[in-house]
Amino acid sequence: GVSFYHDDILELATENPIFDYSKRQLIDEGYEDERIYEYKFYPTNVELVEEPDNPHDANAIKVIIDGVHVGYIKSGSCSRVKNLLRSGKVVSIDADIYGGKYKVLYQDDDDKYLIETNETEIGAKVSILRKK
C-alpha cells in the first residue's frame, strides 16, 4: 500500500515539461489521445525490507525506492514475497510508479481540439524477477 506515502513518492518525481505545452504545441508534436502526466518517475534502485517489528503487521515488507520509503507490499502477498526473497533465486527487483495529474488532447465530434484534465491515484508496482 502507498496511500499514506503520496508526498514521499513525489520526492522521486521529475516534472514532465510536456505537461505545460500549449494546445498548439501538443497538436504539432502529435500528442493527441495520449495521457500526459504532470510528473514522470524513473526508479532505479528498489529494496524490499522485512519489518518484523512493525506494530500493525509482523509480516510487513517495506518498499524503498531510490532511498525513499514509498509503502508496503500488500499484506496478502507478504508470505509469498518473503519466501521468494529468502530463496536466493531473485535476479532483480524493479518498480513502476504511475498516476497523478494528467491531461489529454482530443478532437470532439466537430473536429475541434479540446484538452481534458484529470487525476488518477499515484501508485507503485513492484516486479520481482527470479531464476527458474
Image (tube, rainbow, N blue to C red):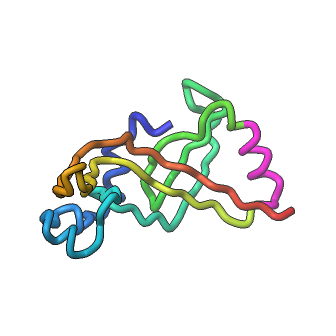
User: Quick check: is 86 in the magenta stretch?
Assistant: yes
Residue at image point 67% right, 65% down = 92
Tell whether 113 sits left or right of 40: left
Q: Quadrant of residue 81?
A: top right
Q: Main secondary structure of the magenta part?
A: helix
Residue at image point 30% right, 42% down = 119
Q: Quadrant of residue 38?
A: bottom left
Q: Position of residue 4 (x, y in %)?
A: 39, 34
The span picked out in magenta is: 79-89
Establish if 51 lies above or below 14: above
Q: Position of residue 129 (x, y in %)?
A: 72, 61
The answer to which of 117 and 44 lies nearer the viewer is 117
Q: Position of residue 115 (x, y in %)?
A: 19, 52
- Image quarter of the C terminus: bottom right
The answer to which of 128 and 50 lies nearer the viewer is 128
Residue farthest to the right?
A: 132
Q: Quadrant of residue 73?
A: top right
User: Quick check: is 31 in the magenta stretch?
Assistant: no
Residue at image point 63% right, 55% down = 127
The answer to which of 20 and 87 lies nearer the viewer is 20
